Amino acid sequence: MASIQLNDVSVDFVLYQGSARSLKKTLLRSSTSGVLKHDAHHRVTVNALSNFSLTLEHGDRVGLIGGNGAGKTTLLRVLAGVYEPTAGRIRVEGRVTPLFDIGLGLDMDASGYDNIRMRAAYFGIDAGEVERKMDDIAAFTELGDYLDLPVRTYSAGMTLRLAFAAATSVDPEILLMDEWLAVSDTKFLEKAQRRAEGFVNRSSIMVVASHVEDVLKRLCNKLLWLERGTIQRFGPVEEVLAAYHAQNAEALS
Amino acid sequence: MTVPRFRRQSADVYDSGDRSQAERAWEDLFDGGRHWRLWSKLGWHDIRKRYRRSVLGPFWLTLSMAVMVASLGLIYGTLFRLDLESYLPFLAIGLATWTFVASFLNEGCTSFIDLEPLIKNVRIPMSLHILRALWRNLIIYAHNIVIFAGVALVFGIWPGIGGILLAFAGLGLLLVNAGWIMLLCGMVCTRFRDVPPIVASVIQLLFFVTPVMWKPELLGERRYLMALNPLYHLIETIRAPLLGQLPGWENWAVGLLFAAAGWALTFVLFARFRKRIAYWL
């Protein structure tokens, strides 16, 4: 049974000298919402997540919302185990499949088939398992003979399908996604949704960050609203969306 | 600090708080080694990618090394008044080994930086990236050492089974040292981005002060200067047995000491900063 537990997790980034000054200016000017402060060595730090506690369980399909710099991507990377928290503790049970970057490990000169194998290798899936699922993956991409050609001959949409098919060919218990579902074509989105739902049905947790409400409404059963690296609200989709809109409307008026 | 025993846990549980940073560093190294299938595959993939559209593939390296050994052998053999029969084999091993050392130093520096997208997307042991780069360079080294085999054949040099085994042991020692050097350089260069060019110029300097082109005997009275250069000792543990000589005990002693001290330092830093590497990228 998959589960995720974050206990008082904080993630601080140190902005190092050299670029620190201009980066600091940039951050302040663009009114992003990460919290800037100075640490003991007078370095500028960004508090991307602070004292973050969260428990996710089997069946949770969570959508992340919030402004730029609210901590969505950082949170996803913490869940993926890429950023080990600077303070606090995280415990994740279950195989995690992070789908943050469409082009991850994509070799433009290798064929579609080779890329599927490469990608699987990065995610720690053994070669035999990939070969067994190859037909299923190939069918899902609808790329046909293109799979024998180098990826550089593909269109962006085709590349996306390849990546999605390759990445979703495993049985992840925990699926993490950052934005990119929103950029795919509608027909593929439906297919992707069916496949993503397939994951959930096979006992999983899904966390997806998106600005597209349709995506959130269709894929998720809970929303997590992040603001300045902390939880603003966590609950059913409609409820959190309503509160989110109310606040945005207030900020506008 | 006591050396922690590796505790295996189910691969599908990740808990950031269940063990010390030293244990995590140890586990990272162990896991990296355990996934030898993955890093060897990726290392090969890197090579194939580099030479995908060329006819000779990695044998371009062999060819350019052959040209280099032949031309440098002629010029420097004449300059140093050495007969080619002893100088060419010496140079062939030296240059191939030096190329390996220089490239693992250089690529050690960029091993994390180059793989930023991967490191920021998937949780993979950091040591795996190092092993991948090391394996890649070892494959290239294998292509380059072929020149020595050719030269040895021409001049009828046969180091004997014992010599070959001893050279492999020397290679093992070099690899153990390469491991910590690459890991250390990788961490330092990821944090301080101006270090890679510094390393590049240090490598150039090291090339001239290490007996690759010239024989240590040429130093005459000042041969003791060599004792201070660990790279000389490491190269000698491979070169001497292939040339049918026994490496000095001091070559092995310095090499082993260098490995022990280097790994101790690197491990302490790795335990302390391993989890910051992703933040530095």
Image (cartoon, helix red, strand yellow):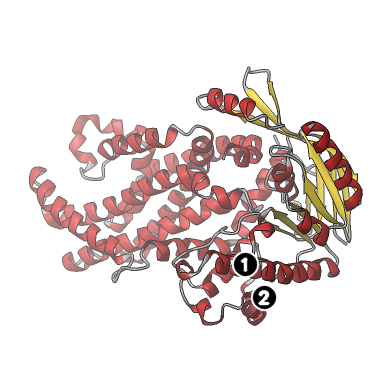
Q: Is residue B29 above or below residue A131?
A: above
The residue depicted at 49 percent of the width and 48 percent of the height is B114
Q: Which residue is mark 1?
A: A120
Distance from Cα at disc 1 to Cα at disc 2: 9 Å
What kind of residue is marked 1?
A: Ala
Image coordinates of residue B158 in percent, x first then y, are: 26, 65
Residue A148 can be seen in this image: yes
Residue B194 horizontal side relative to residue A216, left or right: left
Q: Nearer the viewer, residue A173 or B169?
A: A173
Image coordinates of residue A154 in percent, x first then y, are: 50, 69
Residue B70 horizontal side relative to residue B141, left or right: left
Pick out the residue farthest to the front.
A253
What kind of residue is marked 2?
A: Glu
The residue depicted at 26 percent of the width and 45 percent of the height is B212
The numbered mark at residue B244 is none
Q: Residues within 10 Å of mark 1 (few under 14, many from 20)?
A: many
Whether the residues at callouts 1 and 2 have beta carbons within 8 Å, the answer is yes
Q: Is residue B14 above or below residue B228?
A: below
Instruction: Name the quarter where the C terminus of chain A is drawn.
Output: top right
State the image quarter where residue A164 is shown.
bottom right
Image coordinates of residue A241 in percent, x first then y, are: 85, 47
Q: Nearer the viewer, residue A42 or B158?
A: A42
Q: Nearer the viewer, residue B7 or A193?
A: A193
Image coordinates of residue A79 in percent, x first then y, are: 75, 49
Q: Which residue is mark 2?
A: A129
Q: Chain of mark 2?
A: A
State the image quarter where residue A201 is shown.
bottom right
Instruction: Name the quarter where the N terminus of chain A is drawn.
Output: bottom right
Residue B245 can be seen in this image: no
